Amino acid sequence: MSDALPVAFDYDSLDPGTREFVRRAADETHGLIRKAAGDIVGIGENLRAVKERLPDTLQRDALAGQVAELGEQARAAALKRDEGEYERRVRLNWYSITADLRAGVLKALSRWPCALDAQVFEADDWARLSQARTLARRLLEACDELTPGSGTLIVESVPGPFSGDKKNGAGVDWKE
């Protein structure tokens, strides 16, 4: 598990239907995790109570082993829950970032000047174009850093939130 602190997810960045679905799924998942942890603790308590009532040392030792094993399972479940929560937050944050990026890029491209417009550019306009180009390069470099090795992008064949027609340029698979 990473030592980085998880980023709080911004539900407001989602459309109302997706926001409600994600909140409901997160709440249900947290409830199931709490229930599972509670069930494991309850099983351990039951075994401990039975162990205390048994007179036979051999049976008590066997139950003590089961109690210890259940304790380890509870600790492992808690660690897995924490790791799963971190992974969920990272993925939800990534979804939010890409949704914001998509919206911003589509808005910018819809208002982007044409070559004829550029004929009236002055020095500060050309400077802004240079800054936009630099930011675009930084974004592409950051994307390349996320793809280890040869820079080959690994894509799952499972449809995601951006599946749809590929008319928004260079293989980007985002819906409008």
Image (cartoon, rainbow, N blue to C red):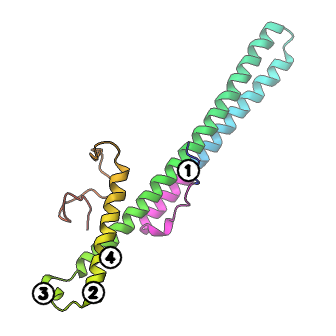
Secondary structure beneath dot 3 equals helix
- Badge nearest the viewer, 3 or 4: 4
- Separation (CA) of disc 2 from disc 4: 10 Å
- Badge nearest the viewer, 4 or 1: 4
- Badge nearest the viewer, 3 or 1: 3
| Closer to us: 134 or 75 | 134
- Separation (CA) of disc 3 from disc 1: 55 Å
Circle 4 residue:
131
- Separation (CA) of disc 3 from disc 2: 14 Å
Q: Are marks 2 and 4 in contact (CB under 8 Å)?
A: no
Task: Confirm whether the magenta stretch covers residue 51.
Answer: no
Q: Amino acid at mark 1?
A: Glu
Circle 2 residue:
125
Q: How many marks?
A: 4
Q: Tag on residue 105? A: none
Is the C terminus in the top left, top right, bottom left or bottom right quadrant? bottom left
Q: Amino acid at mark 4?
A: Gln
| Closer to us: 139 or 9 | 139
Q: Tag on residue 28? A: 1
Q: Position of residue 81 (x, y in %)?
A: 59, 42
Identify the mark nearer the N-term, 3 or 4. Answer: 3
Q: Amino acid at mark 2?
A: Asp
Q: Amino acid at mark 3?
A: Leu
Identify the mark nearer the N-term, 2 or 4. Answer: 2
- Separation (CA) of disc 3 from disc 4: 20 Å
Q: Which of the 4 image quarters holds residue 39?
A: top right
Looking at the picture, does residue 3 appear above or below residue 102? above
- Badge nearest the viewer, 2 or 1: 2
